[in-house]
Image (spheres, helix red, strand yellow):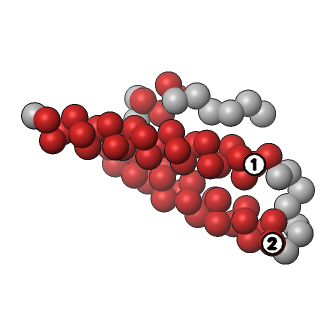
Amino acid sequence: MPLPKIDDWRELSDEEISEQILATKKELFELRLQKATRQLEKPHLVRHAKHKLAQLMLLEGQRTAAAKEK
């Protein structure tokens, strides 16, 4: 499973990006919990979730900065 591309997220609206950020944070929490209890079978999913979260937060920041400039 390859890492998600930022182009996949660019077409989302601001609300959808916020929802995706919350969902990804919850997913990351669950993955960390599984890792701590040694139930995580696919450790690469933690890296994928972190990458996805970083991309979404970058887009959110860019859109916020663009809105302030106007």
Q: Badge 2, how many Cα within 10 Å: few under 14, some, many 20+?
A: few
* Crowd band around label 1 with a 10 angstrom C-alpha radius: few (<14), some (14–19), many (20+): some
Please report the residue visible at 85 percent of the width from the left and 51 percent of the height from the top: 42
Name the image quarter holding residue 1. top right
Quadrant location of the C terminus in the rendered image: top left
Q: Nearer the viewer, mark 1 or mark 2?
A: 2
Residue 34: quadrant of the picture: bottom right
Label 2 element class: helix
Residue that appears at 58% across and 28% down: 5
Image coordinates of residue 13 in percent, x first then y, are 34, 39
Separation (CA) of disc 1 from disc 2: 14 Å
Residue 45, labelled with which disc? Answer: 1
**Residue 26 numbered tag:** none
| Residue denoted by label 2 | 36
User: Extreme top residue here?
Assistant: 7
Tell me the kind of residue under disc 2: Ala
Label 1 vs 2, first from the N-terminus: 2
Q: Is residue 14 above or below residue 28?
A: above
| Residue type (three-letter) at the residue carrying disc 1 | Leu
Q: Is residue 54 above or below residue 28?
A: above
Mark count:
2
* Left or right of 63 on screen, residue 8: right
Mark 1 falls on what kind of element? helix
Which residue is painted at 56% across and 60% down in the image? 25
